[in-house]
Image (cartoon, rainbow, N blue to C red):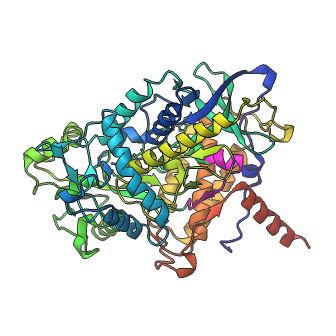
Amino acid sequence: MDAAKISTGQELLSRRYLTAFRIPKISHRFTDVLVIGSGVGGLSAAIHAAKVDGETEVLLIAKSELSDCSTNYAQGGIAAVLEPELNADSTASHLHDTIEAGCGLADSQTVEQVVTEGVERVRELIQMGARFDLDQGKIHFTREGGHSHPRILHAADSTGREIERALIDNALKYPNLTSLPHTFAIDLLIHPEGSACGAIVHRPTGVLQTIWAKQVILATGGAGRLYRETTNPPVTTGDGLAMAFRAGALLRDMEFVQFHPTTLYVAGADRFLITEAVRGEGGKLIDSTGQRFMTSYHPRGELAPRDAVSRGIIRRMKETGDNKVYLDLSDLPPEKIQEHFPQIHQICLSFGIDIAREPIPVRPSAHYTIGGVKVDAEGATTIPGLYAVGEVSSTGLHGANRLGSNSLLEGLVYGTRAGRKAAREARRISRLPIPFEPREEEGAAASEAGYLDLPDLQKSLQSLLWHRAGIERSGPELEASLRQVKEWISYVLPISFHNPVGWTLQNMLTGAYLIIRGALRRAESRGVHFRTDFPEQRREWERHQEVSREILEGENEEIGSKRKP
Ligand code: FAD
Ligand code: SIN
């Protein structure tokens, strides 16, 4: 198959809205700025939008509890050079490390913006009440793979929980900021003239509602749950990516999915993350014979970039025939383990593993969605009035491989920028959007849910991505999985579901299609994307890969015209 010419399932392109809605029949709500998502990106955006004049009405929705998001699970910390003199560090060094990790695709202006403004944002977070670990009264900085210096602030091994707590506490103080948890965004509303003007949502009572807004900020996180093995919480099903795609936004680099090398591997246990900071503090990877192995695969050993460590583990597992390796903490003083990694200690203990004495069984899992909705320096997408911040976005910071602890920072910086910009823009627009009915052909298809076992299909999809579009990929496997996903799309996308379970599966299929398609076309290995049939980086691929409805429609037309006699 010519990877550049892959016809797209027509069903994927024919759905503009996953649900039909009739304006006179449903309730409407109006706001100045709508924020979809309550992680670090969404909360930062909402707070800064609400702060601009204290009057701009901000509505923040989340599909579950506000704190149910990846942000809340972040462990290692947040990278920012707050005290350069302490570790002979500099923002220039942070910039250099980030660009190096990005394997030729990190955007230097974006990196500079994030590493410099990030320092200010982290100080602001501390002023908001976030408490990070101290060492003799000064901030304790830890280290992770790819960072040349210890520059990561952390709150033991529960940094995300502390950041989320501080942001939620702060957000609740603004009378002009309202939050609606358990509100599932189904689709973005785009005015016939082209700008974003709200979203159609499903309320916890089971009813549909339209939220009309002057500006919309998408902060829905990543798509880790598309994979069978993942560190991500259940909310990360790539809804925002699929919504933005249906609405016509430009996405890019969907093939770049980052795998974290070390997640707890015990039968029946969730793939609980074992933070890279454990290796930063001296943890060693060993195989089942007790042999340390990472140094034979990479000069930086356990602190090599994540893609190299993940592949090193996979290779050693193949060599030994085991389904896991081990993380040995025996070089760390027991009091350090208790103090720095209390959560990991506790969780492992609940499975009978005392990490001070026994190595932790680990293996890699899907962790972070590098690709996403393409944005500019303010977080603005290609659709006027629509912004994307946090993991759903593609800012250019991470290139082809994300440096650990850079994403919370990115969420703070871009959340703040987009929140401020959206509020200022909303102030310039005098009238709230006037509700409109979607054109008939854009409405939901007529087909009703038949005899579908949705959880089974979801599991099959997750398994397919893990095995065929995982840490190592190959052309023939990607082709076969693309065919499989298209087949599922052909009978799942046309259905009109009436609840989030069905819409979620439709979003996951859309995300899976975009990831596999991107991975099949990128005929090289770069950063987190490793092709066994193209193991080298190729100069002609030192570029981003963009995708949108329009691009896919164009390709389909081209293929169709070639087929004509
Ligand atoms: P999230 O925090 O995931 O929030 C997404 C929000 O979108 C949620 O509120 C969700 O309800 C909402 N949402 C999604 N779909 C819909 C919908 N259809 N309708 C309504 N709402 C919706 N990064 C670091 O920098 N340092 C770390 O130490 C670190 N550790 C990590 C550890 C783990 C276990 C994981 C999973 C990630 C870690 N990361 C870390 C990555 C980082 O946590 C995430 O990239 C970041 O928190 C994403 O923030 P976000 O605001 O984009 O999305
Ligand atoms: C970790 O703590 O290892 C995760 C850090 C990150 O993903 O940025």
Q: Position of residue 26 (x, y in %)?
A: 74, 21
Q: In what quadrant of the picture does the C terminus appear?
A: bottom right
Q: Position of residue 478 (x, y in %)?
A: 57, 65
Up the image or down, 142 lies above or below 128; here it is below
Q: Indicate left or right for 293 with 39 as reference.
A: left
Q: Is residue 174 magenta?
A: no
Q: Is residue 244 magenta?
A: yes
| Residue 480 in view in this figure | no
Q: Which residues are magenta?
A: 242-254
Q: In what quadrant of the picture does the N terminus appear?
A: bottom right
Between 238 and 159, which is closer to the camera in this rendering?
A: 159
Q: Indicate left or right for 558 with 453 as reference.
A: right
Between 101 and 378, which is closer to the camera in this rendering?
A: 378
Q: Position of residue 269 (x, y in %)?
A: 32, 41
- The answer to which quarter of the image holds residue 255 is bottom right
Give the residue at x 10% y 44%: 136
Give the residue at x 69% y 47%: 384
Up the image or down, 301 lies above or below 330; here it is below
